[in-house]
Amino acid sequence: KQEVTQIPAALSVPEGENLVLNCSFTDSAIYNLQWFRQDPGKGLTSLLLIQSSQREQTSGRLNASLDKSSGRSTLYIAASQPGDSATYLCAVSTGTASKLTFGTGTRLQVTL
Amino acid sequence: SQTIHQWPATLVQPVGSPLSLECTVEGTSNPNLYWYRQAAGRGLQLLFYSVGIGQISSEVPQNLSASRPQDRQFILSSKKLLLSDSGFYLCARQGNDNSPLHFGNGTRLTVT
């Protein structure tokens, strides 16, 4: 059974700092990995999708890497801003219909 | 457009009452559709997914059921709600197995 762990559970950084969020998964036979952002009381917003054959994906100040063999992914956020404050979740897909297994998230707060 | 409509946004129901949550999606035809539940302090749990009209797969035994009467409509139901059914219910769609998952804004259900 796939298990996804995210460390740290919570993180507070001053504005402008670069930061890394970690995600690990137990079964390396994944289809793809996705990073999401969730604002309080809202649904999830897809940030980046990495296929199993890819090593990284970039979107603006976000960069996600994937090391499938070691069961790890990182989300790098450059020059953090208060608007980046949210919970970040990673999820891995195995099998057909892309059933996702989610981590419990990292709650990020970027302070002024 | 990947718009996903979920309603209602919040719902308070007594134990033993029925439930019907509706999700309609826009965009490409024959999407994969999903119902997830996010309980307080816990990760997202996949409840049901559907790869086509009338095709429903259940991930966990529970008090809930799902139906897909039309290509872009996904309904979550219960005949008699339990206290443990309280949570944040999210509908999601996916164009195909390689595309990102897009979520609606969710329904917060409180069973009293």
Image (spheres, coloured by chain):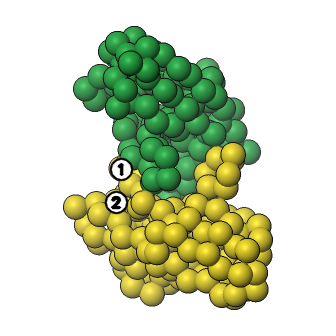
Place residue B37 in its image quadrant: bottom right
Residue B17, given in percent of the width and then of the height, sits at 70, 87
In the image, B25: left or right of A31?
left
Q: Which residue lies at the image location 65% right of the left edge and 79% below the top edge?
A: B13
Place residue A64 in its image quadrant: top left
Residue situated furthest top in the rendering? A17
Do labels 1 and 2 touch, CB within 8 Å?
yes
Q: Which residue lies at the image location 67% right of the left edge and 55% below the top edge?
A: B39
The amino acid type found where label 1 is placed reads Ser
Residue B46, given in percent of the width and then of the height, sits at 61, 59
Q: Quadrant of the C terminus of chain B?
A: bottom right
Which disc is residue B84 wearing?
none
Place residue B47 in its image quadrant: bottom right
Secondary structure beneath dot 1 equals: loop
Distance from disc 1 to disc 2, alpha carbons, whole Å, reads 6 Å
Q: Chain B: what color?
A: yellow
Nearer the observer, A69 or B67: B67
Q: Which residue is mark 1?
A: B99
Q: Quadrant of the N terminus of chain B?
A: bottom left
The amino acid type found where label 2 is placed reads Gly
Which disc is residue B95 wearing?
2
Q: Chain of mark 1?
A: B
Secondary structure beneath dot 2 equals: loop
Residue A25, given in percent of the width and then of the height, sits at 64, 32
Q: Chain A: what color?
A: green
- Residue A77 vs A37, above or below: the answer is above
Q: Residues within 10 Å of mark 1 (few under 14, many from 20)?
A: some
